[in-house]
Image: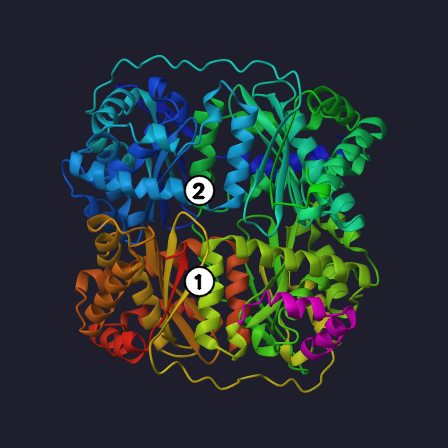
Amino acid sequence: MNNRDSLLTDSLLAPFFKESVDRFILPNGLIVIFKEDHSAELVSVQVWVKTGSMDEADKTGAGVSHFLEHMVFKGSEQREGPELSAAITQIGGQLNAYTSFDRTVYYADVPSEGAETAFDVLSDLVFRAKLVQEDYEKEREVILREIDMAFDEPDRQVSRAIFRTVFRNHPFGHPVLGNRDLFLKVSVEDLRNYYTSRYVPNNMVVVVAGDIDRDALNAYLESYFYDVERKALPMRFIPAEPAQLAPREERMIGSVNICRGAIAFRIPGINHADSVALDLLAAVLGGGESSILYQSLRERNELVHSISTSCWNPGTTGIFWISYTCDPDKQDAVENAIQDELARVSRQGIHPDDLQKARRQAIVGEINARKTISAQASRLGLAEVVVGDLEYPKSYFKLLQTVHFSDIPRLILTYLTAESRTIVSLNQELPKETERSVKRKVQLSNFELITLPNGAKIVYQQDTAIPKVHIRYTGLGGPLYEDKSNAGITGLLATQLLRDTKNRSSEQVARLVESRGGIFHEFVGNNAFGFGIEMLSEDVMTTCNLIEDALLHPLFSEATFERERNAQIAQLNEDMDDIVEFGRKQLRKHFFGDHPYGCDSYGTLDALKSLTAQSVKEHALRLLLSRNAVISICGNFDPDKILPELEAILSVIPDYAFEKESPPFTPPSATQSYREQMEREQSVVLQAFSGPAINTEDYYTANVIEELLNDMSGRLFLHVREELGLAYYVGAYRMTGLHTGMFNLMAGTRPGDEDAVLDVFTKELTRLKEGDVSDADLAHSRLRLLSQTRFAHQAIGSRAVNAGLNCLFGVDINNWNNHKALLERVNRESIARFASEYLDPAKAISLIVGPEK
């Protein structure tokens, strides 16, 4: 590593590594990790139970750990099941959990004034769960749905196949959810025994980060965690995985449009001397758009639609994993090309700049992991529970400096060998011939607006909390500016703006951004399109230069157009494989009909196939106009230096008349029902109603109703999932436009129960129409929405997105200041009026997607 890299690491990460983190152990053996941080009025409290699917002993492969994670939410000695979630959501917090191979984590992210409630509820979950037979029977059906749903998700099928093929003895070979046949044999008594033996204080770590002081922490620990007794722990026995001596394969055939595949190699665990170097190897080979495999297989040879590389080794062993998607007939060519590239790099090595880029990405990744209070707590939990040392991040970056570019060939020859190779794929049935802490209190300033003479706008906000800047260009576009013949063209435009320019190729753009640890991405939605770049503050002038190239010097080359069009077609085909995405697209088409909103921003296969590079260029001439240009910038930057740069870029964008599109739409006046056949284990039930536009007061009423219907402690969820056991997931979502919208209900259920779900939907909407909503439910929904804003506003990118879109749509760029007042206007009467006006079952469009009736 050169001196500049070493200095960069020290200058950027040293302040984080110097932050105070306390670690202490209670008399009962419970470990506490505490980081005081007053940068936001939020607290994250997390309980890491050091037990997961690899600790299930004679029940290995049955999913006991995950089953128990579900069951503890069904009620405690002090609270009924719904009250556990409600206690957190009512104070504007978020409560959740996850299970992995080696841990089960329960976490509550709350406003700081609700910190004690988080300690109270989490201690209830991990020490006082009731675990009764009635709840066991209901939740078993819910998890069976979840297990079955995994077979409907192609990506998860590939992931599972990799683990079971690589690991034949180790518990990693079993899914965390459990194997269905073994899961069915788990009794409630098994869950109780597991809970009492492994959910003990000396097998737990409590991580606390955020706006709380040590005195308050000690008081809450004494109230909720001190009095639980230590117990003897059963020994953890993990069978050793024998060395792999020959290549392995698993080929799966399914009803899919896109081939998904992976090539995996078993590697040593996190404590091995080569662990850090293997992380860098993964970044060099497949970490971003300038990586070796991405450039070779996607950009130059156009064999894949996506390709990436991961290094996963949390314990004593792990997997080095190259995953890809491609057209079904290219699978063999892709696998051969990957192996050819590995062989080439093992012979020729890499350029030192590739390793420097990977290090930079690692540094930025470490900074990104500290963006939010919750992420900081998770980072500490991983260091303590998975690695076993809170100082590991510091050691990791010291080791990062010792890796030399000449190590890369050795790593490939040592670990990525033919004998240790495992290949897995999920493809179509092909024709036979082709088959095979510093304490600080930060008050964010408002965004400021600059309007240029040509109508272009800049919105900006300074935030010196971390050394990063996010800059985003946004313009009106998407379905409203397309028709059936060119549906999806705005997405291609957004993609190509950040690819080839007259000054840089797509590879050079990717390499420039990623060599500095930055990220860049395009976006297109129902009403807008654009792109964003986030980099370190010292690279902000580079960011401005890239934005100038994209807006003023796009190339729209034929080769890039063909490649990106094929990628967008591949994404459409991927969506068609997913029952939920397929259903959402079909529902939208049935509801909006011939209106442009009837198609989402990805377009249609027929339209995409008819497009040309010239048509994208012509579309750019229509949309890339000064009166349709907003640049938003947020982060740590000098306005006196950067704003003139952005003004200079926007001032030369053509100042022609820009026509805003607002095609009329008449919502359905009568109920209609549709059914789409899709051979899956589940059915998805969807229902669409008219919804409000963005610039209306009803928009906020819709926000509250959507939150009411998505509340895990709310009536709809409890009735459909908990009481009736009809669905694993149920809730609401919206498609919001500038002049109209669509409000939707959705549930995943077992085939045969679809009509029962629709009946529940009707009853729930009738309740809303009658204004049957409690003051408490209303208050809790408002509070959750306000907390979501608080959580989102931790990230500079999120703030830049919101301010840019608000400016573009004619909304107050600082409307988050009025969020509370606007939500408080929503009451029973406005909810009843909204339900009567919009959510009329007599005008609903219903769709069922699932196996043949």
Tell me: 791 left or right of 268: left
Q: Position of residue 621 (x, y in %)?
A: 73, 77
| Residue tagged 1 | 676
| Amino acid at pointer 2 | Ala
Q: Is residue 66 left or right of residue 618?
A: left
Please name the residue shown 75% across and 47% down the image. 511
Query: Observer-nearest residue: 483 or 738?
Result: 483
Residue lying at 47% horizontally and 35% vertically, measured from the top left? 379
Magenta segment's dominant SS is helix
Q: Pick the quarter of the image with the C terminus.
A: bottom left
- How far apart are labels 1 and 2 at the CA level? 20 Å
Is there any visible trace of residue 793 in the rendered image? no
Query: Residue flagged by tag 1: what amino acid is it?
Result: Glu
Quarter where residue 690 is shown: bottom left
Image-based side of 515 in relation to 97, left or right: right
Kindly indicate the quadrant of the structure image that contains residue 421: top right
Say whether residue 153 is visible.
yes
Q: Disc 1 on helix, strand or loop?
A: strand
Which range is magenta? 599-624
First-in-chain label (1 vs 2): 2
Q: Position of residue 159 (x, y in %)?
A: 53, 36
Could you tell me residue 735's position as x and y percent?
44, 69
Q: Which residue is mark 2?
A: 150
Position of the N terminus by quadrant: top right
Which mark lies nearer to you, 1 or 2? Answer: 1
